[in-house]
Amino acid sequence: MNIKSEVSSICVRKSGPLEGNVRVSGAKNSALKLMAAALLAPGRSILHNVPRIADVVWMGELLAQMGCAVSHQSDTTIIDVPDEIVPEAPYEIVERMRASIVVLGPLLGRFGKARVSVPGGDDFGHRPIDMHLRGLKELGATFTTSHGYIEGRAHRLEGTRVLLEFPSVGATENLLMAAVLAKGETVIDNAAREPEIEDLASFLNGMGAVVDGAGTSTVSVEGVDSLIPVEHTVLPDRIEAATYLAAVGAVGGQVCIEGGRADHMKMFLNKLVDMGMEISSAADGIHVARLDRLHSVDVSTLPYPGVATDYQPLLLAMLSVADGIGIVTENIFGGRLRALDELVRLGADIRAEGHHVLIRGVESLSGARVRAPDIRAGAALVVAGLAAEGETIVGDAHHVARGYEDLVGRLSSLGANVTHM
Ligand code: EPU
């Protein structure tokens, strides 16, 4: 897989209205979990529509270190899982990619043992995994922690009713993957409802699992004795689609986002319509047009089907140049407002108070050197740069390559003035 992860900066110049068609890749936040889920069955699982991004390469490396044979051909990833593996996720990989914690559920479910480096703080600050561990304990696993590693053990897990304190995406996924091979029925209450959870359930059911209710708050799993490998196509990336929508929001134009699923991002699209964008859903994807300057709106991030936290930096970028005052409230990750200071460097008029942000839209931003603090904030700075006079250099662009397949090439194909440096 050829990825521009070594690219350190993205250069953005003020761009006119965007025109044309752009295709979205498969969802990062589904593909990574499906790769982990492949561990549940010996043999060859095949994933199509896998985004060619750094995180997918790292997840492949993690599975390879465990003893799987992993190959990537274009957007297809093939994973051959042996009968026995090394059930360990080392520090070097977990530290780079927190999502690797999702191997815990499948390892305990199938092999009854797992050794996973304790995920440290990350781009959003402190991020605990207490809900993952508590749920797995309720299924019968035991954990010890030493020398920076969590060691989990289980005889065969036993189904039970688990109530999540919060609809955590990762905890729901870990529990789902652990429960499919448990003895008896597991019910996850207050489960996350994101489309990626439905994609995971459909992958697991293709392996012979019996999962019901994915996409609702109550997911039930009837455990089976063994699973078989599966061939599956990853659902489209709603956050990537949102990034092109935000780019049109920032500089105007008319674009078709091929493969975009409007039904996976309704609340976000409603907000964009409130801001003055024209959006329609068609067989080929999402059609978007923006002719006049956007109006400001207030937005709060919430678990699905609410406006996702991942859209928040993109909304900040759009509101920075919208007409009026908007208030954005970040309810999911307390530390996820790191695009703010960088947007201020571009001339945005922003004030933050706790997890609330007040943005007074300005007529125009002005290009400057900024730094991508994480994947989505990095993409949002690229979007803001399109609306900024002169040149914006987004440093630390390796963050963007973690989650976007050729963001620069795809925006350029719409007429945006963006290049790698
Ligand atoms: N939380 C806990 N304890 C836990 C688990 C979560 O307190 O055991 C808290 C988190 O700290 C956070 C909230 O619960 O405040 C929600 O976290 P969640 O578990 O839902 O998030 P996640 O699974 O760690 C995934 C995505 C994120 C996305 C969130 C939306 C992946 C790899 N990551 O994270 O995506 O923002 O769901 O909830 O799927 C990205 O793609 O850039 C990204 C960060």
Image (tube, grey):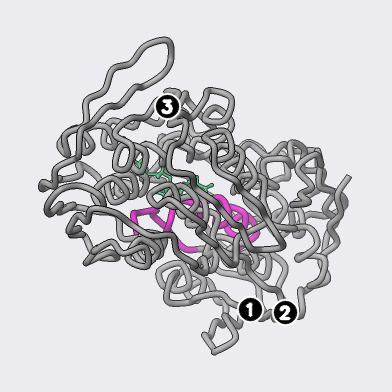
Task: Choose between 83 and 408: the one closer to the eye.
Answer: 83
Above or below 405: residue 375: above
Residue 21: give its label. Answer: 2
Q: Quadrant of the C terminus?
A: top right
Q: Answer left or right for 344 relative to 4.
A: left
- Mark 3 belongs to which amino acid? Val
Quadrant of residue 340 within the rendered picture: top right
Q: Answer left or right for 210 relative to 206.
A: left
For label 3, the SS is strand
Question: Pointer 3 and pointer 1: residues touching (CB < 8 Å)?
Answer: no
- State which tag comes first along the sequence, 2 or 1: 2
Residue 305 visible, this angle = no
Residue located farthest toward the front when viewing the structure as drawn: 83
Point out residue 138 in the picture as x, y percentages from the top left corner.
15, 36
- State which tag comes first along the sequence, 3 or 1: 3
Point out residue 186 in the picture as x, y percentages from the top left corner.
15, 52
Give the Cα separation between the discs numbered 2 and 3.
42 Å
- Mark 1 belongs to which amino acid? Glu
Q: Which residue is mark 1?
A: 258
Question: Pointer 2 and pointer 1: residues touching (CB < 8 Å)?
Answer: yes
Q: Residue at x 29, y 42 (%)?
A: 109
- State which tag comes first along the sequence, 2 or 3: 2
Q: Residue at x 20, y 44 (%)?
A: 164
Point out residue 419 in the picture as x, y percentages from the top left corner.
86, 54
Residue 116: give its label. Answer: 3
Give the Cα separation between the discs numbered 3 and 1.
38 Å
For label 1, the SS is strand
Quadrant of residue 302 within the rendered picture: bottom left
Q: Would the CB of label 3 be found within 8 Å of ligand 1?
A: no
Boundaries of the magenta span: 297-322
